Image (cartoon, rainbow, N blue to C red):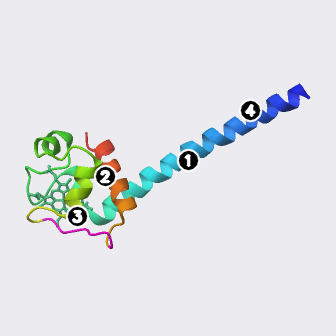
Amino acid sequence: MKKTFVMFSVIATAVLVFGTVCTAKDQDERGGALFKQHCSPCHPDGGNIINSQKTLHKKDREANGVKNASDIVSKMRSPGPGMSTFDDKAVSDKDAKKIAEYILKTFQ
Ligand code: HEC
């Protein structure tokens, strides 16, 4: 009986860990795919083909006051000169957040 319980716990833990890892991976992939679709034409590899001072890399971004996910989402909703606007019809709040998290993680 005890053995069965231990076995069950091991399997349950494995399933739980596996599920969490997979979900996290999907989130990353979705953020990355959305970034490619909407942002990479002007920001290839986190750069900026129009204004080279305003890349998505941490150093430039933070120097320009864009520090966290909500700053990035604000930029999408009301961008500066040369950047297209992404309203919540183009990119939902949820997706905008995923893109922001992808940028923060990818372009250090
Ligand atoms: C048509 C070209 C274009 C597209 C598409 C575009 N951007 Fe931009 N982006 C720019 C330009 C130009 C700037 C500089 C604007 C300014 O002066 O604020 C900029 C600035 C930024 C900044 C501020 C960077 C800094 O260092 O100050 C962020 C963050 C940003 N874009 C995110 C995005 C995201 C996220 C997307 C996709 C949803 C996107 N951009 C799509 C052209 C673009």
Task: Indicate yes or no: mark 2 CB to ligand 1 under 8 Å.
Answer: yes
Give x and y (percent) for residue 78: 17, 64
Report helix, strand or loop for mark 4.
helix
User: To which quarter of the image does residue 40 belong?
Assistant: bottom left
Marks 1 and 4 sit apart, C-alpha to C-alpha, by 18 Å
Amino acid identity at mark 1? Cys
Q: Earlier in the sequence, mark 4 or mark 2?
A: 4
The residue that mark 2 highlights is: 100
Image marks 1 and 3: residues in contact by CB distance under 8 Å: no
Q: Earlier in the sequence, mark 2 or mark 3?
A: 3
The residue that mark 3 highlights is: 77
Name the magenta segment's main secondary structure.
loop
Q: Earlier in the sequence, mark 1 or mark 2?
A: 1
Marks 4 and 2 sit apart, C-alpha to C-alpha, by 36 Å
Q: Which residues are magenta?
A: 83-89
| Residue sitting farthest toward the top | 2
Report helix, strand or loop for mark 2.
helix
Report helix, strand or loop for mark 3.
helix
The residue that mark 1 highlights is: 22
Report helix, strand or loop for mark 1.
helix
Q: Earlier in the sequence, mark 1 or mark 4?
A: 4
Magenta stretch contains residue 17: no
Amino acid identity at mark 2? Ala
Give x and y (percent) for residue 85: 20, 69
Amino acid identity at mark 4? Val
Q: Is residue 70 above or below residue 39?
A: above
The residue that mark 4 highlights is: 10
